[in-house]
Image (spheres, rainbow, N blue to C red):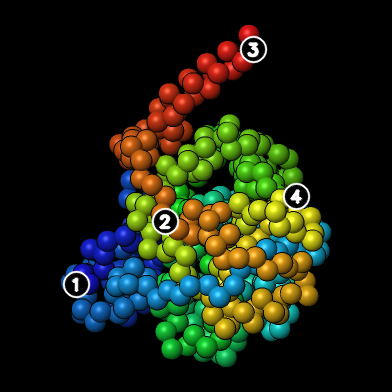
Amino acid sequence: MSDNISSVKNCTGCSACSSVCPRHCITMREDRLGFEYPVVDESACVSCGLCLKTCPVAGSPDLAYPMNAYAARSIDDRDYLTSSSGGAASVLSRHMIKSGGVVYGCASDGTDVRHVRVDRLDDLPRLKGSKYVQSSLSGVFDPLKQDLKDGRDVLFIGTPCQVAAVRRYAGKLSDKLYLVDLICHGVPSRKMLKEHVACVSGGRPVDKMSFRNGNRFELTLASAGEVLYRADNDRDMYYNVFLRGLSYRDGCYRCLFARPERGSDITIGDFWGIDTKSHPLPFDCDSGLSVMLPVTGKGKRLVEMISCDMKIEGRSIEEAVNGNSQLRKPTRNTFRGRLLRYLYAHGLSFDAAVRISLFDKKLRDIYRKIIGRR
Ligand SMILES: Cc1cc2nc3c(=O)[nH]c(=O)nc-3n(C[C@H](O)[C@H](O)[C@H](O)COP(=O)(O)OP(=O)(O)OC[C@H]3O[C@@H](n4cnc5c(N)ncnc54)[C@H](O)[C@@H]3O)c2cc1C
């Protein structure tokens, strides 16, 4: 273990250290790529070690192999069609609020993406949809701990590293805490997203962003109900490098949580690679399908709780793990990704850095189109 939080390898930028510090001497500062890292004011630090105790990647994480695997989708068509995968996150959230609990999840306000607290059903749509960027947890840890102290059930949904941070932060108060982690292949910074959005929207203010249209990956930006920009993952520069795994935080390429063993009560994600030809599903899933992997007794109870609102089919854990590389290993840190991040860190705009790092790929696409036309 390192003696100072600033020297922890693989920092995930969760900001739990900064929230837990009793002397308020840890500040999160952005690096040149826009990722936040803790900086300690050594003159105020009393070496109490709370920051290291709370850090999700200092020491080895507590992980366990899933108990079961399920393919699922919401039975409510409107809910289903507005969710990223099969709507597992929104069904879980609805149940939690209906039974008097609170939910912490990721919302976007324009291009500002952060975790918020929701305790009313009317506010749940704010959490819907994947926002493919690192969400800020600043301001979330204290109210979450207070909810647990007040004896409320709390559902937290986030990336595996965020879930690990919340788990450590809650410590002994974890009885009423339900943790759901998303299968995650890595996160770009909010700075990258903001710059890209400003570039493709021509600087016009954006009040709504969406990253998915069912199974289709597409970035849509809107202002006052008018669509300003829409492009699929092939055409959109931000999406292109996100799905190729080039624009992530450094630690994502060494992620401790990209493996079959999980640190949550339930892992959810897309059920990529499901073999519906040999083993058909008894329901349609053309607009996306959730995978649910309960890991603990609490996780199993959550699945039972939502089974009346979801079409659910038991599948093998191996099928889920084999179809989703993020359940096996972290994304590879390639030369192309390192080039992109180097160029961006050294002064190029995000879009210019993307264009240069994908130059040969784009040339090849143009060449293929020309050959195809003949
Ligand atoms: C950065 C990122 C990478 C992902 N990579 C993969 C992958 O490789 N393989 C895979 O199978 N699935 C991946 N997912 C998960 C997938 O995209 C869906 O989010 C997940 O299946 C939930 O869909 P749903 O229909 O159940 O949820 P919905 O009902 O659409 O709700 C989405 C939920 O995700 C949470 N959320 C949204 N954006 C973020 C964010 N930036 N950070 C933390 N929480 C967020 C919201 O709080 C909400 O609870 C990724 C998600 C993110 C955010």
On screen, 303 above or below 344?
below
156 vs 20, nearest the viewer: 156
Identify the image quadrant of residue 282. bottom right
Give the amino acid type for the residue marked by disc 2 in the picture: Lys
Label 1 CB less than 8 angstroms from ligand 1: no
Q: Is residue 252 above or below residue 263?
A: above
In this figure, which residue is indicated by the disc labeled 3? 373
Q: Position of residue 249 (x, y in %)?
A: 38, 51
In the picture of the structure, the residue carrying the numbered disc 1 is 3
Say which quarter of the image contains residue 220: top right
Q: Say which label, 1 or 2, has the lower sequence index.
A: 1
- N-terminal-most mark, 2 or 3: 2
* Amino acid type of the residue tagged 1 in the rendering: Asp
Real-space Cα separation, disc 4 to disc 2, in angstroms:
27 Å
53 vs 178, left or right, is left
Image quadrant occupied by the N terminus: bottom left
Q: Are marks 4 and 1 in contact (CB under 8 Å)?
A: no
Which circle marks residue 329 in the picture? 2
Question: Quadrant location of residue 236?
Answer: top right
Location of residue 374 with respect to 246 vertically, above or below: above
The numbered dot on residue 286 is: 4
Question: Mark 4 or mark 3, which is nearer the start of the sequence?
Answer: 4
Answer whether residue 307 is visible to the viewer in this image. Answer: yes
Q: Are marks 1 and 2 in contact (CB under 8 Å)?
A: no
| Rendered position, 79 above or below 294 | above
Residue 132 rendering spot, x and y as whole percentages? 54, 51
Is 146 positioned to the left or the right of 287 in the image? Answer: left
Q: Nearer the viewer, residue 228 or 210?
A: 210
